[in-house]
Image: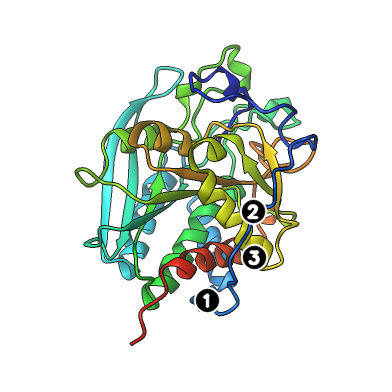
Amino acid sequence: MKRHFRIAVLAIAVALLAGCHGKKGDNTPAAPTTKDYSNVAIPAFNADSAYTFVADQLAFGFRHPGTKGHEQCAEYIARMMGRWCDTVIVQPFSTTLWNGQHVNGKNIIASLAPERENRILLAAHWDSRQWADHDLDTTKWRSPLPGANDGASGVGLLMEMARVMSVMPPDVGIDFVFFDVEDQGIPEWAGRYEDNTWCKGSQYWASNPHKLFYQAMYGILFDMVGTAAPRFTKEEISMNFAQGVMNKMWGCAAFLGHGNIFVNELSSGILDDHLYINQIIKIPTIDVVQNSVNCSFYPHWHTVNDDLDAVDRNTLAIVATVTMKMIYGDYPAKKK
């Protein structure tokens, strides 16, 4: 994935929180009240299946625009989602990267019950970064990376959720959106910084949604959700635009015994796809994103070591279970 600590330079009307990303301080919000999720029935998420979907993406090789792996992976995601969802829309777009390179991208939108007015947006980015600009080995800064946790983990999670939710659909429409060209922003070695060089697919989709006048009640973005030591905090932009959604999800996680993973701690804003969804199309959207202590997101972020070893099956299952418990708690599956 891509994100950046220089979110402070964004022209958004939010007050930055004190403290650094991933650092504890006076940033503990009041614990939200939660409902009883004991009797909420959800589909059986298969962690091995989700992990296989992650591995399948990496098998295509590097997945940045212009590569064979990028084309093959786009076809794979659309084809697989077509097995489970009622509709699949591939949204092509063209954009220019920080270095003036023109590239073609593809956002992929797969929907359950597209006719329903009430909808929930679940999103991730599917491209892999082409510059390992945070690698400890400076000779690798211009090398592409596998993008296992940063990209493929969120996609694999959503693919397995789509598979099982299609068998036991909730009483609400679901849109699975896979954004492209998220992680091709300006590298550290470029000598300058520009915010909008990131998240090109979500910027395009938010300005040109796949359906005229599209809206959803809320959205959840999944970014780097597969580490063996998961830690998700209440990111500032999410809290600014969608505090109720974030508090509900963290409350659900606490009820399920995962309060040590979905940590009740405020953290500084992150430049990610949810920013543009909130700002442009104005769907209240939160970011579930890894926030390890004392490092940038997780140790292998934007390095050549972001491979399959960086992804843990159990973490994928925990994130999916919390998400589905929250959704089905509000919109239970209809009994047949």
Please say if the residues under marks 1 and 2 sit with CB atoms less than 8 Å apart.
Answer: no
Please say if the residues under marks 3 and 2 sit with CB atoms less than 8 Å apart.
Answer: no
Residue 107 picture location, percent across and down: 34, 44
Q: CA distance from mark 1 to mark 3?
A: 23 Å
Amino acid type, callout 3: Arg
Residue 161 picture location, percent across and down: 47, 66
89 sits to left or right of 133: left
Residue 118 picture location, percent across and down: 31, 58
Amino acid type, callout 2: Pro
Residue denoted by label 1: 40
Amino acid type, callout 1: Val
Q: Identify the mark at residue 313; answer none if there is no mark.
A: 3
Residue denoted by label 2: 32
Q: CA distance from mark 3 to mark 2?
A: 28 Å
Residue 136 picture location, percent across and down: 76, 31
Q: Identify the mark at residue 164; answer none if there is no mark.
A: none
